[in-house]
Structures are given as C-alpha cells and as structure tokens.
Amino acid sequence: MVGDIMDSTSTNLTLPESLEQVRIAGLPPAAYYISNFITQHEEEAILEKITSAPKPRWKQLTHRRLQTWPSDLVNNKLIDAPLPAWLNDPIVPRLKSIRLSNTLGSSDIFSDSPHQKPNHVLINEYPPGIGIMPHKDGAAYHPVVCTVSLGASLCLNIYKSKDDGSLDPKPAWRILQEPRSLLITTSALYTEFLHGIEDITEDVELSGSTIANWELLRSPDDFAGGCNVRKTRTSLTYRDVMKVSKIGGKLGLFQKK
C-alpha cells in the first residue's frame, strides 16, 4: 500500500546534516546534490501514483507529457490548493528538515520563500532521446528549485549566455542526476543561467572532469565506462509560486478533478 511507506521516520536514509555538506563545488552559487533522498520503495510508490493519475491530469506535448499539481498557473498565479499527500510526504518534510549550514539557528532552503515551503510540483516524463531546450524557469517562482529524479539517470546541462545575449550552445557544466536523487539550484544559478536536457539516447564522456557533481554521486562506478544509456526518467520539480489566489481555492475554480 502506498500510504504505508510515506513515513519518513521509517526509512534508513542517511541525509546530510546541512546542505553545505552536499554543495556542488565549482558551480555558481548555489547548487546541492543528495544522491539518496528517497528510498527505492518510495520511488516505486510515487511512480505508481503518477502513472495511475486520471488521463486529464496529463498534458501531452509533442514528444513527452507532464502533470502540474495542484494546478496550472494562471497569469503567473497559483490557485490556492494543497498538494496531494503523496507529493507532500515524505518529500516536503524532508526538504524542510535539512539546514542550510551547521551554524546554530541555520534555516532551511525555503525559509525565505513567501510560503516557506513548496506549493507547486511539475512532473515531467522524459523518454529516451527526448529532452527540453535551454530555458529559465521565470519570475513566477521563488529562486529555489528542488528536483527529485525517478526511474533513471540523465544529464542536466547548464548554459551561459554570450556577451551579445545569445546562448552559448556548449554547456558550461553538466550535472548527472541519478534516480532517487535530489538536486537543488538557487540564487545566481537560477536567475542568471539557463538549463536544459539534450535530445539524446545516451549521455557520453562522463567522468570526474566533465560532471560537476561526480564526487557526490551514489554510484560513480555505474558510469565508469563514461556513458549512460537513457531509460524513461521522471522528474518532480518542487517550487514556491510567489503569488497565490485565494478566490480559486474557495470557489473550486480551475481545479482539475
């Protein structure tokens, strides 16, 4: 039963005492990577809930599909509604439990956001060979993005803009995201740089010199051959939408059933 496993106190995970312990060195401020953020049992349960969601929940794009919870944004505003329990537990309490540093009184990653926790989740399903073009997430969100990866590994590319404002097509950095991992990007890395996923079936040239978070990987030996053959990977992107409309929550407007 899904409900039986969503208790973070029942896991054997060893989470870092602070995010400073898992900061990705060499990147602009600031990014953090936790290779084991959820258990395999939790991963399987969340994937089951995603795949069993009613068909209207899925938004079909040209080559992939996605879900938004609790709803889509309307004019950069979120209709006030809670996240479903299976997206809240265990991930949100776990995010809130990790301090930014070991300094006495240090806060969590969402302590400065308008609602002090994520209120929106975007679920993206990436089949092999399908990615997403370089982009920024935009001004609707507080500049903290927490991405939990499910099912398979792939590389996230970080891009710089050239002096003339055009995009440098060569990634400045690559981050390898393993299943059950958490990647947090904040601050300048969120506001000043673009991120994207290449439309390829295999990530290549993987090593300690090419992957920014290599030292933080759970299983670097899995990529000792320098490649990762992609399988379907699903991502959960947790963010705090800054503007929330209370009216919709009261009237039930825009809610997907």
Image (cartoon, grey):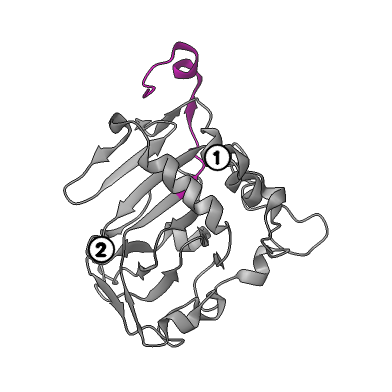
* Direction from residue 251 to residue 125 in the image, left or right: left
Toward which corner of the image does residue 153 lie, by quadrant? bottom left
Q: Residue furthest left?
A: 62
Q: Which residue is mark 2?
A: 128
Residue 199 seen by the camera: yes
Above/below status of 76 relative to 7: above
Q: Amino acid at mark 2?
A: Pro
Q: Residue furthest front?
A: 1
Viewer-nearest of discs 2 and 1 = 1
**Percent x, y for residue 2?**
54, 40
Q: Which residues are magenta?
A: 237-257
**Percent x, y for residue 248?**
44, 18
**Percent x, y for residue 131?**
26, 60
Q: Secondary structure at mark 2?
A: loop
- The residue that appears at 59% across and 43% down in the rendered structure is 113
Toward which corner of the image does residue 56 lie, by quadrant? top left
Q: Which mark is residue 1?
A: 1
